[in-house]
Image: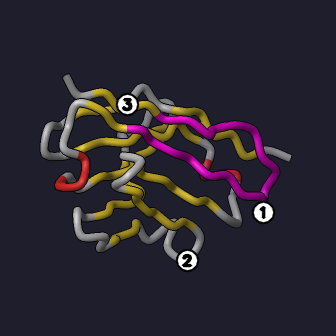
Amino acid sequence: QVQLVETGGGLVQPGGSLRLSCAASGIIFSVHPMEWYRQTPGKERELVASITSGGGTNYAHFVKGRFTISRDNGKRTVSLQMNSLKLEDTAVYYCRTPLRNAWGQGTQVTVAS
């Protein structure tokens, strides 16, 4: 059974930083591409960043240069380092493994002054 657990959300001021982590179990983590999505009320869930099993990365245009996705196969985690946070980054952030279409429960990120 696939389980993804996100941690690291919280309240931060504009311009601040947060680091999200997603711990995976029930999968051979090293072969899975991983993704971070976010969702705000009334909006579709949107892809923020992805990382391949080999470590290749892609970012949505609205986070490029500010967010960094990384993975640690030994710890079975994928992380999202978020810098220069903006008010519009406020959302629930989810990790996903597309090979199994499995989602975590999400972690709230709130950017407010």
Mark 1: amino acid: Gly
User: What residue did someone put label 3 on?
Assistant: 104
Residue 60, percent from left and from top: 40, 66
- Is 93 a magenta residue? no
User: Which disc number belongs to residue 15?
Assistant: 1
Which of the 4 image quadrants contains residue 101? top left
Q: Position of residue 2 (x, y in %)?
A: 23, 28
Q: Amino acid at mark 3?
A: Gly
How far separated are the C-alphas under marks 1 and 2?
Answer: 13 Å
Magenta residues span 6-23
| Residue 58 coordinates in the image, percent (x, y) | 34, 70
Residue at 24% x, 70% y: name it: 54
Residue designated by label 2 = 65
Are the two marked residues, 3 and 1, in contact with CB atoms closer than 8 angstroms? no
Q: For this rendering, which residue is in front, 5 or 35? A: 5
Q: SS class of the residue under badge 3?
A: loop
The CA distance from mark 3 to mark 1 is 26 Å
Residue at disc 2, secondary structure: loop
